[in-house]
Image (spheres, rainbow, N blue to C red):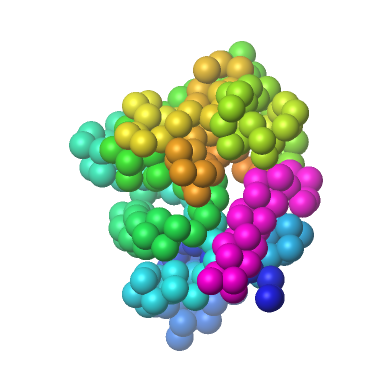
Amino acid sequence: MGKPLIGISGRRWPATVLGAHVPPAMSSLSFDLHFADYPQSVAAAGGVPVELSRDADVTDVVARLDGVVMTGGADVDPALYGEDASADLGETEPERDEWEGALFRAARARHLPVLAICRGLQLVNVLHGGTLVQHVTLRDGRGHPQWEVDGRRTTHGLSVVAGTRAASVLGDLGRVNSLHHQTVDRVGAGLVVSAYADDGVVEGVETADGEVLAVQWHPELLAKPDPVFGWLVDEARRRLHESALA
């Protein structure tokens, strides 16, 4: 039995954002990207990371995976939860919202473990019928976001809810980083809140079946191997083992 294959979602940007690094002949093209810390974290936990393309049917893609990471990025389109855009709304990527929504549903249909990070948590909440606070501001040097602080530094405390899957995974983690300006407002149906920040902001949600673990911070930037990536790879490995015995 080989190592579990973990698919990682990402962004699609026009090549022009690379400026002089792209020759004029290629300026009309697009490229897919994600920060390298995501696959590095999967590999450190014992999985095989693979970047996912949105150019194939998600059912076919998920059929070849053992787990999924939904990564951070742009704001979720508020139209998905029935709201107009606020003045403080950041960049949105509706095509990514649609693709990752389909990816999430396909992963859930196959009972794959899903780790959702930052934007990933927010999208999972919206896909479950929840809503978001479109913008929160830093107060007295505390809270969210912490854009000027190195993302590898922890900036606020974390309270994990006893009895949740997150509690068994995170242990006494205690502090996390903060690189988000949107937060959970109304929690989606079927989701359980598993962690809070010092100021009461929801920092973790999960599904009751234990197949989805979503965190608001960026664990890929913290010490490797990180416990939530360890959870993802262990769950994917367990599923592989069970499939082999079936």
Based on the picture, tell me whether residue 35 belongs to the magenta stretch: no
Residue 33 found in image quarter: bottom right
244 shown above or below 38: below
- The residue furthest bottom is 25
Q: Is residue 23 left or right of residue 198?
A: left
**Residue 134 in sight:** no
179 shown above or below 159: below
Q: Position of residue 139 (x, y in %)?
A: 56, 16
Question: Residue shown at 68%/65% (left/top)?
Answer: 47
Based on the picture, tell me whether residue 221 belongs to the magenta stretch: yes
Residue nearer the viewer, 209 or 6: 209
Question: Residue shown at 76%/59% (left/top)?
Answer: 44
Question: Residue shown at 75%/28% (left/top)?
Answer: 172
| Magenta-drawn segment | 220-246
Residue nearer the viewer, 241 or 81: 241
Main SS class of the magenta portion in the image: helix
- The residue furthest top is 140
Which quadrant would the N terminus be assigned to in this image?
bottom right
Question: Residue shown at 36%/36% (left/top)?
Answer: 190
120 shown above or below 101: above
**Residue 231 in sight:** yes
Q: Position of residue 165 (x, y in %)?
A: 58, 37
